[in-house]
Amino acid sequence: MKKLLVVDDEAGIRESLSLALLDEFEVSTAASAEEALDQIGRSRPEVMVLDQSMPGLGGLGLLEKLGGQNVPGTVMLSGQVDVEMVRQAMHLGADDLLSKPFDVAELKRMLHQAAGHIRRDTATDLPLALRGARAVGQASAQTTPLPVRSRWLSRTMVAEAVSECRGDRELAAQRLGMNKAELDSVSEELLEQ
């Protein structure tokens, strides 16, 4: 069983999530981001449910403190989801975000997916989907010329397809409606620009 850390300042939510997830994960809990920092250092959970809004450091603060290193696969929970918060959470290492109230089956699916992710230490080694998310952010800047935005979005599409297929370029090419040679050619062309 994968180790799961549930981080929420509300005792009822921690207890409910622990009971709901106990059948599929080895669950531990933390009542604050500061407590979670200590537990992550000691027990090294593979995956974490992280409440975004907590007194003190908070969910985003915890991810920022971890600095991209030793970040467990993370599903962030939030009562109020906005685009900037999602962008910041993904940039700091969250794998997914779920708005409250949520479906436990959907949370389990997201946690299993997040548990398989590996964190990197540098921006160039970030998972392709995160590089793709950054490219989307850059592409949406109004001051960027349209041809440059188009290349960034193309890179994003290729990066996300390859990432979703866990590096299987043949499967990624199939999802993009091309063969592997075409995908390799497009990838090389995009990387050169």
Image (cartoon, rainbow, N blue to C red):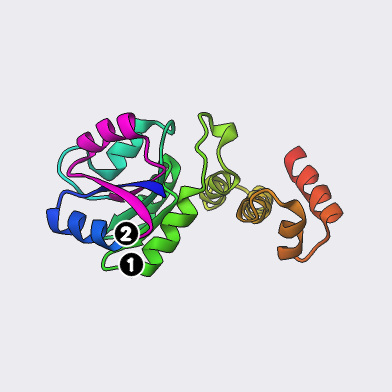
Measure the alpha-carbon separation of dots 2 and 1: 8 Å
**Which residue is pictured at 45% across the width and 50% down the height?**
95
SS for dot 2: helix
Q: Position of residue 174 (x, y in %)?
A: 76, 63
Using the rendered view, name the quadrant where residue 5 is placed: top left
Mark 1 neighbour density, 10 Å: few (under 14) some (14–19) many (20 or more): few
Q: Position of residue 26 (x, y in %)?
A: 34, 49
The stretch drawn in magenta includes residue 171: no
| Dot 2 or dot 1, earlier in sequence | 2
Q: Mark 2 = which residue?
A: 21
SS for dot 1: helix
177 relative to 83 in the view: left or right:
right
Task: State if disc 1 and disc 2 touch (CB < 8 Å).
Answer: yes
90 relative to 59 in the view: left or right:
right
**Which residue is pictured at 31% across the width and 68% down the height?**
102
Give residue 9's mark.
none
**Which residue is pictured at 18% across the width and 47% down the height?**
54
Q: Is residue 30 visible?
A: yes
Mark 1 residue type: Val
Give residue 104's mark.
1
Span of residues in magenta? 21-50
Residues 139 and 44: in front is 44
